Each structure stands twice: as structure tokens, then as C-alpha cells.
Amino acid sequence: MVNSKNGNYLIFIKMKKNNLILMVFVCLTVLISCIKDITPTSLEITVQDNSGNIVSGASVKLYSSISDWTNATNQIGATQYSDASGKVEFTGLSNIKYYWYVEKDCQNNFNGTNTTASALVAEVTNLSSVVISGTGTLKLVSNSSYPYSIYINGTYAFDMNGGTTDYEDFMPTGYYTIRVLQVSGYSGYPTDETFTGTLGCGATLTTTFP
């Protein structure tokens, strides 16, 4: 014969065990539900041109530092392309600043915004926009054996040694004045010439001197 006291005790232990299993199951269910509800940290970028028009089909590359952006190294994830709304979205990011390079044909953001204003806000979709514009290359060819100072649109840019060629990439499109001023190797007055021309999108404007 089973003692009624012992029987009640066994029933009590079994009920506690069942309740514990139920509580663990409920906690796991709630935890899984909470994990599913967490929004990943994301960055949505909208691409526009100088006129404010949406740009689709632009390639967007993401980086986590300005040095990586400058050297095109350690790209974050795969290159994305803006959709019909001009948007791309990168997900699963950290709450840090990010940098991007955007390009379509001869247009890019080299001379525009290339980073978030601050670190991303965690677990939300952060919104940003970028304007791409046309760029080209200024090519300067010195046929002199003497050094020259180069002024671009009225501002001193750099010095060039004789017999050298310099390429200035990612220059904004438009009208340019290129002044070349001889630094040494002259008697009397130095050679001082100004050349003009218009740089087109994706084109090269060449200045040969003297």
C-alpha cells in the first residue's frame, strides 16, 4: 500500500517539474519572438543628380573608414545598384560612421557627400542621400626644361618640374582657366601664359606649354 503522504509528495514533485518545463518553454518562445522583432541596423541611401532627379542604376560601394574609401579597400558587402526610386539599402551594420562611393557613367560623388553625418542609430533604418555630378580630367604637359607654377581658375594649385606630365582626376565639369608661370630659367620676364577650355563629363582637357 502506498502511503498517501508519500503519494501526494510525488504528485507535487511531478507538478513542479511540469510547471518548470512549461515556464522554460514560454521563456524561450518569448525570447525567440523578441529576437525576431529586433530591427537590424541599416542604411538607406538615395541617389540624385545635380538637378535633384532620381538616379537609378548607380553603383554604390560602402566602406567603414575614410582611408578605405580613399584607397577602395575593405569594401563592406557587395556593390549595390540604385533601384527605380534611386535607393539602395545596406543591412546588418554597426552603429558607426560609414562612407560610400557612388558612380554612374561619368558621374560620381567624389566632390560631394561621401559619409554619414554621425554614427548610425542602432536597430533602425538610417536615411541619407547623395548627389552625383559629372567629372573629368585635367592633363598638363610641360615641354619646358624649367619649373612652372600652375594656377587653376585663379588659384595656385601646384608646381611642375620641366618635362613632366600631370593628371588632375575627378575635376568638376565646366569652364577652366589654366595659368602657367615660369619659376626659374628665364632672363627678364618669366613666361606667363593662360589657357582656357571647357571640361566635359568623362573627358580630358589637355594643356600643353609653353
Image (tube, rainbow, N blue to C red):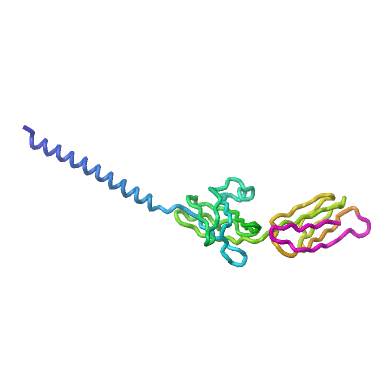
- Pick the residue in front: 143 or 122: 143
Which quadrant: the N terminus? Answer: top left
Q: Which residue is drawn at 21% across and 42% down?
A: 18
Residue 122, percent from left and from top: 46, 54
Q: Which residue is drawn at 51% across and 53% down?
A: 90
In the image: residue 154, left or right of residue 84: right
In the rendered image, the residue lying farthest to the left is: 1
What's drawn in magenta, residue-wise?
A: 186-210
Question: Across the whole image, how many numbered discs are drawn on residues?
Answer: 0
Quarter of image, res 82? bottom right
Quarter of image, res 39? bottom left
In the image: residue 17, left or right of residue 137: left
Residue 15, percent from left and from top: 18, 42
Judge whether residue 178 is colored magenta: no
Which quadrant: the C terminus? Answer: bottom right
- Pick the residue in front: 73 or 83: 83
Q: Does residue 58 sit above or below 11 in this rendering?
A: below
Residue 97, percent from left and from top: 54, 53
Quarter of image, res 118? bottom right
In the image: residue 121, left or right of residue 209: left
Q: Residue at x 57, y 50 (%)?
A: 63
Q: Which residue is drawn at 52% across and 52% down?
A: 96
In the rendered image, the residue lying farthest to the right is: 187
- Pick the residue in front: 129 or 65: 129
Judge whether residue 189 is colored magenta: yes
Q: Does residue 23 sit above or below 83 in this rendering?
A: above
- Pick the residue in front: 34 or 134: 134
